[in-house]
Image (spheres, helix red, strand yellow):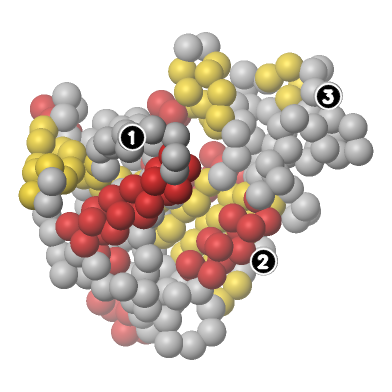
Amino acid sequence: MGIDVQRSHPLTMSLAGVPSPRAFIISNDYRSTSWPGCESRVSDMTITGVEDDLNCMLDWASHFMMQTKVYHDKIGDLRPTARNLRKILGTKRTLPTFIYISGHGSTINGENAYLPIDCIKWNQFATDKVISESEMRTLLMAQPNPAPLVSCASSNFLGLPYVFRLEGVDPIWEDTEYLETNQKSPNPIISFYNVSPDEKLSLYGIMERLKLNVGQMRNDHDSGNGSYLHQQYKIYCSHKFDYDHFFEALGFKLATGETCWDETPL
């Protein structure tokens, strides 16, 4: 998931009004006959919970004043193909932009990669269709942009210079191995996990909520099966900061009316 925020020129805002943020939701359930072992459009690759995840993301996006565009297996031109995903990641972002990507990953040529809906050819992966983490990083950071980029991932594949974590209840900022490289970059970037927009949380508040949520899931899962396993809850950032309300600081305002749905291709 990514959010890129760039303020518009004051003259543009005066002529066209304040532009709405944009949301791109890529939802891939792999119900395609092209996938190996797929019969009746269902295979071991099929993700049965995609519809629930999609509904959750649409509900999440509806809390904000933004235009939302969904790329789904069943939606004509708006399908989660390699071409569409590369276009979304690589297009210059002139408005606050939210990007959510769901689906399968794999290890291709020794690197983690995302599997678009059209990455199977002749019963095997087409290497020109899979999108590696390094390519995602290149596409997202290709355009010089002084605005924050917010991205959700299970690892620091964007190579961010700082990590924010809790030691007990104490917030701690630490340098990552990418600090020196990022000091030369003009792109401020931040990565985070699992946030509720209804609660005006600071970065520290987000971390506390994440810790509680994940801890509860672990306790539910491990109930009666031994002791609780300690986990670290990390937020990777381009710089050390905190704000009273994380999303408002990035330019995302809570919605007061109806969400605008955009059904045209990017």
Residue closest to the eye, 189 or 142: 189
| Residue 10 horizontal/vertical position (percent) | 25, 76
Marks 2 and 1, Cα distance to the nearest angstrom? 49 Å
Residue closest to the eye, 174 or 84: 174
| Residue 260 horizontal/vertical position (percent) | 56, 77
Residue type, mark 1 in image: Ser
The quarter of the picture where the C terminus appears is bottom right
Q: Residue furthest bottom?
A: 257
Image height of 48 relative to 182, above or below: below
Label at residue 263: 2
Q: Which residue is painted at 37% across and 65% down in the image?
A: 196
Marks 3 and 1, Cα distance to the nearest angstrom? 40 Å
Name the mark nearer the viewer: 2 or 1: 1
Image height of 216 relative to 205, above or below: above
Chain-order first, disc 3 or disc 1: 3
Q: Which residue is painted at 44% across and 34% down in the image?
A: 225
User: Which residue is labeled 3 in the image?
Assistant: 37
Name the mark nearer the viewer: 2 or 3: 3
Q: Is residue 146 left or right of residue 195?
A: left
Q: Which residue is painted at 61% across and 44% down in the image?
A: 84
The kind of secondary structure element at disc 3 is loop
Residue type, mark 3 in image: Gly
Q: Is residue 193 visible?
A: no
CB of mark 3 within 8 Å of CB of mark 1? no
User: Which residue is labeled 1 in the image?
Assistant: 227
Q: Residue furthest right?
A: 40
Q: Residues within 10 Å of mark 1 (few under 14, many from 20)?
A: few
The kind of secondary structure element at disc 2 is loop
Name the mark nearer the viewer: 3 or 1: 1
